[in-house]
Image: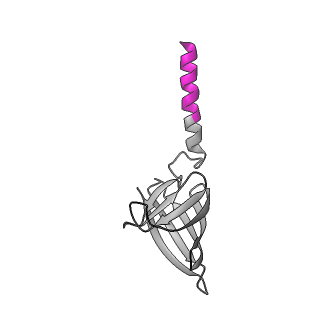
Amino acid sequence: MVGMFALGLAGILFVSGCESDDDPDGGNSSVVGTWTRGDDTRYVYRADGTWDNYKDAALTSRHFGGTYTQSGSSVNAQGTNPGVGDLEVIGTISADGNTMEIDFIEHWHDPYKHVPGTLIRL
């Protein structure tokens, strides 16, 4: 009985520890998941450090993508829009983890074009 309790407690501590890796304050700031601008466009951030942008809610029409890094609530994504050029998305996730303010930076413009926006977690 004591062994089962210890095993259960170890599992709870392991899961809790995993959640706190992205946000030392214990919030839900992990970027991993699917985000939208409020339309059919989707931004999908994966745990392996990759992300993709889709033109449709069904995730069948990939537009562009790349890799990202995250430190706390700050996200920095790099990618390439095929046929157009390189891009960057700098984001800050809200304290509740439900929205992310972004600066979408189009490197194919000179000077770079900045397009601000808000993403909503699905």
Q: Vertically, is 72 above or below 42?
A: above
Give the farthest residue toward the top.
1
Q: Closer to the camera, 2 or 81?
A: 81
Q: Residue at x 58, y 20 (%)?
A: 6
Q: Closer to the camera, 38 or 95?
A: 38
Left/right placement of residue 52 relative to residue 21 reads left
- The region drawn magenta spans 1-14
Q: Residue at x 49, y 74 (%)?
A: 116
Estimate the x, y position of residue 14 in percent, counting from the top left. Answer: 59, 34
Estimate the x, y position of residue 110 in percent, counting from the top left. Answer: 61, 87
Q: How many discs appear?
A: 0
Q: Which quadrant of the structure image shows residue 13? A: top right
Q: Residue at x 60, y 69 (%)?
A: 79
Give the farthest residue toward the bottom.
110
Q: Vertically, is 62 above or below 95?
A: below
Which secondary structure type mostly characterizes the magenta part of the structure?
helix
Q: Which quadrant of the structure image shows residue 20? A: top right
Quarter of the rendering occupied by the C terminus:
bottom left
Q: Residue at x 46, y 71 (%)?
A: 117
Estimate the x, y position of residue 105 in percent, counting from the top left. Answer: 56, 76
Q: Look at the image and say whether residue 6 sits in the magenta stretch.
A: yes
Q: Look at the image and say whether residue 39 sits in the magenta stretch.
A: no
Estimate the x, y position of residue 115 in percent, counting from the top left. Answer: 50, 77
Q: How is the image coloured?
A: one colour
